[in-house]
Image (tube, rainbow, N blue to C red):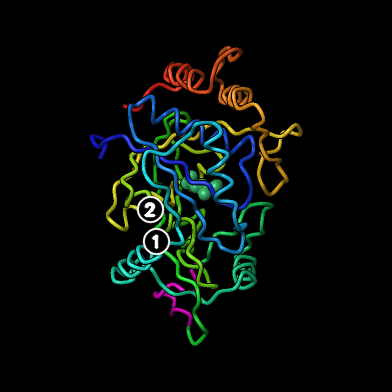
Amino acid sequence: MHNAVYTGRFAPSPTGPLHAGSLATALASWLDARAHGGRWLLRIEDVDTQRCIPGMDRHILWQLAQCRLLPDAPVTWQTRRTRRYEEALAQLVCQQRAYPCACSRRDIARAAAARGHAPRRGQPLPYPGTCRPEHGGPAGRKACAWRLHTGQPQLLRWQDRRLGWQQQDVATQVGDFVLRRADGLWAYQLAVVVDDSAQRVTDIVRGADLADNTARQILLQRALGLPTPRYLHTPLVRAVNGEKLSKQNGATEVDLGDPVQALARTAHHLGLRIEARGRTVPELLQQLTACWKCTYGTAA
Ligand code: GLU
């Protein structure tokens, strides 16, 4: 896998315009691809149609173009690729690695409370395995979601290029996670794993807020017999109050009135220090690529 041509990607969800944090992810993944002489792809992650804003995909593409962050292949949209997700789920069902689930959030909270687990702020409760086939399945209740059977508790270790070795016991800490939601929408975990593999992505560069999804994604890659890419999770851009910047907490659209300034500020968030004054966008990007190599190195 890692002898393959370096292929990176930026995968925004069109739920809002790029803010300082998402532009940093876009720039980081672009710079890493350039630093490796590789390809950079753009994938619009619009599977969660309820949260997507019509036209936002085009707006994001425009924002990226202002910064000369241009993909090396045609842009892809996840909503146009659902057949691949269906095939992946069918494969997992055949392998008895996916099973239908009828639990509502309230059922999960109740089962967790019965085991003495209290919900913690911002942390979903681990799924207690109520509908696992060995526990009798949904037993007469109407099944609607599909979950991955995560198997026996086991520590999964993976290496991040910046954060070093990471580990998680997915079965215990997360539990069997959702592949297809009760409302029929495809879950991020399944779509991202299927697409990264179909697009032959060798290197995932994204914000550190997504790092704790990685063990789940590796487990899913293994279940589907897919290769695991390299990972690099970049430092988060924080709001003035120290919170992570996100569309949810109202992060504002990045100001691209002066793209050189915008890129220089973004580079600063990534720890890249260079003098931007008097440069054009292409000149700046070239300089930043060299600076990126010194700061983050290249993948082994
Ligand atoms: N679509 C995700 C987001 O906008 C990113 C997914 C990923 O990079 O794996 O947060």
Corner quadrant of residue 94 = bottom left
Determine if the C-beta at disc 1 is less than 8 A from ligand 1: no
Q: Secondary structure at mark 2?
A: helix
Amino acid type assigned to the residue bearing label 1 in the image? Arg
- Alpha carbons under labels 2 and 1: distance apart: 8 Å
- Write the residue at 46% across / 28% down: 162
- Write the residue at 42% across / 41% down: 9
Residue 262 higher or lower than 41, as above or below: above
- Residue 136 x/y as whole percent: 43, 80
State the quadrant of the C terminus: top left
**Disc assigned to residue 195:** 2
Residue projecting furthest to the right: 241
- Residue 228 x/y as whole percent: 33, 44
Q: Are marks 2 and 1 in contact (CB under 8 Å)?
A: yes
Amino acid type assigned to the residue bearing label 2 in the image? Asp
Name the foreground residue: 268 vs 173.
268
Q: Which residue is mark 1?
A: 81
Q: Please give the count of numbered marks on the rendered protein.
A: 2
Corner quadrant of residue 1 = top left
- Residue 146 x/y as whole percent: 45, 70
Residue projecting furthest to the bottom: 140
- Residue 290 x/y as whole percent: 43, 17
- Write the residue at 68% across / 49% down: 248
Q: Which residues are magenta?
A: 129-138
Q: Indicate which disc, 2 or 1, sits on the residue closer to the N terminus.
A: 1
Q: Main secondary structure of the magenta part?
A: loop
Q: Is residue 149 magenta?
A: no
Name the foreground residue: 121 vs 208.
208
Discs 2/1, front: 1
Residue neighbourhood size for the residue with mark 2, other residues' Cα within 10 Å, grouped as few (<14), some (14–19), many (≥20) = some
Q: Secondary structure at mark 1?
A: loop
